[in-house]
Amino acid sequence: MLDTRQSVRIVMVLALVAGLLTSCGFRRKKYENPIAKDTQQPDKVLFDKAIKDIERSRFEIARLTLQTLINTYDTSEFLAKAKLAIADSWFREGGAHGLAQAEAEYKDFILFYPTMEESAEAQEKVCSIHYRQMDKPDRDKTHAIRAEEECRQVLTQFPNSKFAPRAQQMLREIQEVLAEGEYRSGSFYHTKGSYPAAANRLQALVDQYPLYSGADEALWELGDSYSHMGERFRDRQVAAYTRIVRDYPLSARVEDAKAKLQQLEAPIPEADPVAYARMKYELENRTKPGMMSHVWGIFRKSPDVSQAAKSGSPSMASYRPTVPASVPPAPGTGTTTVTGGTADVSVSTVTNSTALDTQPDARQNPPKPEQSAQPGPGGQQQQPAATTPETQNQPLPTNHPAQKQKKQKKTKNSK
């Protein structure tokens, strides 16, 4: 019995010593970009010493050694590798300061050595830097937007690199987080009853991120938002339900979308076979969350990307918010449509300082449907949007229908 207790104590002491040694930096993590050339040149000796320090987490000593190599042997064949190793040391050190320094060093390496194979790896590391700092969908999206831009740069500048597939998958996961944030905003407006704001968010979401795991649910709420905005948005309502049936054939909303299309007397499309195969693959290969994932997810800083797509081409265009339907059209456009266009802003010099006093407000005088057509792209005449007499006189949808009704009731009671 005594021998058993002693053996248990010895094992516990050995485990404690091993843990202390590991925490003190004696654990060696192999470096990814060593130089295989076997030589005793002084610059190679310095490089090997720095790599050993990096592997043992002695980052400051490694950077001093690499800087000595760069300053002393300015014609060395290992200059590029030394500069990359400095960036890798910052990347391994981590922390907000270390990652910021690593990004700057990687950018310098790509600038000085754009044709080297390691440049693709450096760009992929820059993407990883912001990917690791991403917050959850309902929080600050600065790092997510930066990560999306840097991952696109990998696919654009180094499309044939071995790092391109990994960057593409990271881009899918990043866009899943960004799309989830947009969906939460659109769903909030939809629940609140602000249907133009909901439609604006959800429409931009499904157009920009079709691989989003909740795109079918977003389309369903988009169609419902358009149904509350008047008869003039019937075509957009039909388009939303049609996309559910055609592009997301395995969605739980397919039967409901078909029922809506029948009510609207619209044709029911056939399922796209490519979309069916992609959605089947996603459902079969989707990562299933563990039993404790919901519990630990509350305390986790990083977002959950288990539902992100694993196939398909991610969006390569930047996200551009559209103009909500509740915004009146600009005067003199010659069209009554209120849903097209993007939120572009032009700047010009003001020559007439009395314009605000003499010209009426555009919201008080919307353009009339019988205005003449304006020249479109290429000098061709752009005809006004076709409207029926029933819809052209309808007021613009508002984000506060309940408040508007209350104001009208108060006005009647005061009279």
Image (spheres, rainbow, N blue to C red):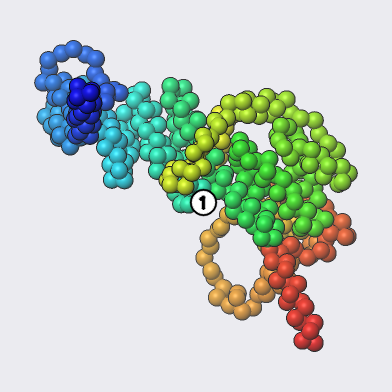
| Residue beneath the point at 77% across and 78% down | 409
Q: In what element is the residue under mark 1?
A: loop
| Horizontal side, residue 31 vs residue 363: left or right | left
Query: Is residue 131 visible from the viewing direction of this image?
Result: yes
**Label 1 crowd bin: few (<14), some (14–19), many (20+), radius 10 Å:** some
The picture places residue 306, in percent across and down from the top left corner, at 53, 35
| Residue beneath the point at 76% across and 77% down | 408
The picture places residue 400, in percent across and down from the top left corner, at 69, 66
| Residue type at the position of mark 1 | Asp
| Residue beneath the point at 30% across and 36% down | 91
The picture places residue 126, in percent across and down from the top left corner, at 37, 36
- The residue nearer to you, when weighing 385 against 19, is 19
Name which quarter of the figure residue 107 lies in: top left
- The residue nearer to you, when weighing 337 against 143, is 143
Name the residue tied to disc 1. Answer: 138
| Residue beneath the point at 75% across and 81% down | 410
Q: Look at the image and tell me in which quarter the C terminus lies.
A: bottom right
Up/down of 367 relative to 83, above or below: below
| Horizontal side, residue 132 vs residue 218: left or right | left
Name which quarter of the figure residue 325 lies in: bottom right
Query: Is residue 86 visible from the viewing direction of this image?
Result: no
Q: Look at the image and tell me in which quarter the N terminus lies.
A: top left
